[in-house]
Amino acid sequence: MFADNWKISLRQIRRLFIMDIFGMSSLILPGILSSMSGADGIFCLLLGMAGGILLLWLIGANVKHIKKDYYNYMKETAGQFLADIFMVFYFLYFVTLCGYVLYQITTLSLTWLLPDGSYLGVSLLLVLLGVYGSARGIEGRARVYEIIFWFLGIPLVIMLLLAMSDVNTAYYTPLVSSGLTPLLQGSAAVLIFLLPLTALLFLKPYCKKPEKMVSCGKTAMTAVILLNLAIYLVLLGVFGKNTMGVLNRPVITLMGMVNLPGGFFTRQDVLMTAVWFFALFALLNTGIFQGTLVLKELCQTPGNRIVLWVVAASAFAIGKAFFDHSFLMEAFEIYQTWVALPGMFLILLFLLFLRGARAGRTERKGGNG
Amino acid sequence: MSIQITSDLQENIRNFEELFSDCEDIKKRKIKVGESLGQECYIAYIEVTLSSVDFKDSAVGKLLGKLRTLPEQELTAYVKENIEDISDSQPFPTIEEAAEGMLTGDVLFFLNGYNKALKIPDKGYPGRGVYETESEKVIRGSNEGFSESIKLNTALIRKRLRSPHVKVKESFAGRRTNTNVDLVYLKDLIYPGMLEEIEKRLSEFEIDGTLDSGIIEQLTERKKYSPFPQFQTTQRPDRAAMAILEGRIVLLSDNSPVALILPATYNTFIQTSDDYYSRWEIASFTRALRYLASFLAMVFPGLYLAITNFHTQILPTDLLLSLAAARQGVPFPAMVEVILMEIAFELLREAGVRLPGANGNTIGIVGGLIIGQAAVDANIVSPIVVIVVALTALCSFAVPNEEFATAFRILKFMFIFLCGSLGFFGFLAGLLAVLIHLSHLESFGIPYLAPFVGADLNGYQDERDTFLRLPLEYLKKRPVYTREGARTRLRLYKEKEKK
């Protein structure tokens, strides 16, 4: 039959990644880019996208050599020891991402939806939902986001179109004035938000048409960057650089300001929070799923259950730590910028280099022989 | 240990009567046959299953009449050569099998010198005949409904699908009830493995009795704790025939007017027969309305609580003030108020179902108008809650399948608790939980949310018959659960001519 084959379609992959990348990037990037580079944030988004294309190229170049799964490919190419180290690196990335997303989604819920709620209660409920979502594998997860894709996308686009009437184009200037360093820092920030695309490396065994998987990633990334570009332009035009820089989640503030025709709903921020709630939950789920997948392979455990709970508990603990100790947020930013981002590129480059060197050696041997 | 039927009629009678001792409803008669009435035969039947007492017009009567015209020595040969092979009669070699045959409502015939018992069909068990369906009413289309007789039900499907490819596979369920269970399908359309899967599931249990298809449904479902049914049910032969044309399998159980259809998806539960009989515009409009109704039947009271208790900023001030004014003097918190009204409504519904027709309607009116009005006047509930509960009830009635609507009725209470205590966050968490559950759910290997998920499997064709029902000429392909290579259901020759 069709279900329970542990394979997902290209459309499901595309939608899953759009949700994964869009939620966090649209929520947090506008504030970061605005404070770093003002109107030049547009260029940061484009440069970040160029970096994303490079990342996807590296992913694609490695994926085509994967026979069984990524872990086995790393073992074949770099040996057991290095492969294990790389897997630990990926595990740390996904589990900290999980914790961070959990913290973000919980604070989002507490700020906009349940101001009197308890962090622990909300966070625990979300983790449990995350476990429930990941328990039956990738198929169920992909189906959820295949379904709600348009339900979230259409209202968002409508709201953005309605918000355009408040845009003041004077805020779009001055352009090209922020300097090279903020531009590069902004681009790096964009690229950090595109890093969940590395999950593609682990998806080959789960994809119905693995040869087109990376191109799906490209489509998802392009769609998200274009959407972010539109959001950034609207936000910049409505709030201006300075106000946007101090707003915590400017896109949700904007949703609260949009006037719907007819005037029945006076504020839509609560309703529109659903878009980011579902999108962030998608990334949380991806983090839990990928973390479980990596840890399971690393520990060579036959079942998913214990590993899943370990990852969920770790994410919960990390999220709580972010909530209790604000300095950890800075530490996480440093980790993402100086460890995770270069690490993702270097591992892929290193694997390609080793593969290339080995192929060259084999060729030379063949030539000599 | 089975008892073999022998050529000795007396021995067979003794064995048979021993098996059916103290069964006064079973009529047993010894009858003389042959030209000079020198030979003996024996017939047994359940009292009401034979059409006339003197057998004149019945098949058995005609057989006996014929046997009285033949010489005694030719009787056995005549029965062997002329009766055994008649399609409806069936020879049994053992007493037990013969008894089972008789209990299906046919007449059993033993003849001295003949070592088998013959089952000869006659009137059979009494039944209702073909009546109009009580549920699944349509504006356009047939009004015939299934009855309690499985034979009649299969015939009603056959009447609509006059193809030799329609197969009826018979089995029995229930150790003591020995209920006939028929699987009806189009051989060239069903997806490979689907028939084997249902047969496997039917063989996975042994139960005392299956008095309705609901028992089979529950015993063969995989996700037992899901509120959502994994079989579609129907009382309409045209709906069943339509399902068979889509490559699905219809399971009929004797004594039950409710047929089970497998596989089932969210989309199939929302579809009705007249969606395809009416023009596409109205079909699409009502389809979209039913989707909305299924959603609101689950979340509307919860959303009301979330907005009025937690997120009042969404609503315009005027509306907010009128809501507050309506609630003035109501002693209960809004959540308790909603729960009270919902429970009252569910009680009315239950009472209305159990009472005879006219009284049921009265209860609806008394409950809806008098109790509702009295509750508002007594300041027990606010008028707005009465409106919310009534609209939710309307939404649940708009869902065409009763079992499917029940799932939303149950989940509604979960949303009331979540939204009443956690506001819009509770609503989103609940929605996510339901979505995850539905995305995990399958019916015979088909995702419950198909074709919204996995639409690529059939080239995105199935999406043309979901929220909207596109014009029939766009619905050229059968859904994904049909066998690959047999999915074309409509060919337009006009197009060919144009080309």
Image (spheres, rainbow, N blue to C red):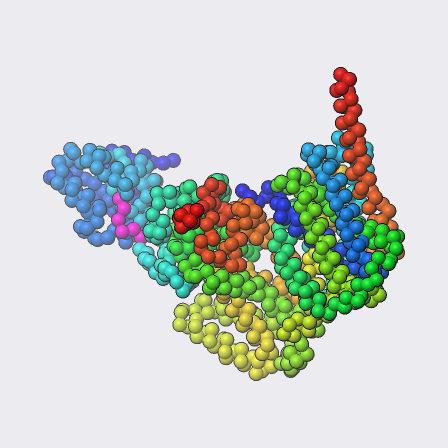
Range drawn in magenta: B119-125
Q: Position of residue B31 (x, y in %)?
A: 19, 44
- Res. A355 in view: yes
Quadrant in which the N terminus of chain B appears: top left
Q: Percent x, y for residue A72?
A: 73, 34
* Magenta run includes residue B280: no
Q: Is residue A219 left or right of residue B135?
A: right
Q: Going 65% across and 41% down the picture, which residue do you hit? A: A212
Q: Position of residue A252 (x, y in %)?
A: 74, 64
Residue pushed farthest left?
B36
Residue B128 or residue A49, whichever sits in front: A49
**Residue B231 % position (x, y):** 49, 52
Magenta span contains residue B123: yes
| Visible residue check, residue B421 | no
Q: Residue at x 57, y 53 (%)?
A: B452
Is residue B230 placed above or below B164 in the rendered structure?
below
Quarter assignment of residue A233: bottom right
Foreground: A332 or A224?
A224
- Compared with A226, B182 (above or below) is above
Q: Nearer the viewer, residue B166 or A76?
A: A76
In percent of the image, x 52 and y 78: which residue is there?
A: B371
- Viewed as shown, does residue B344 lie left or right of A128? left
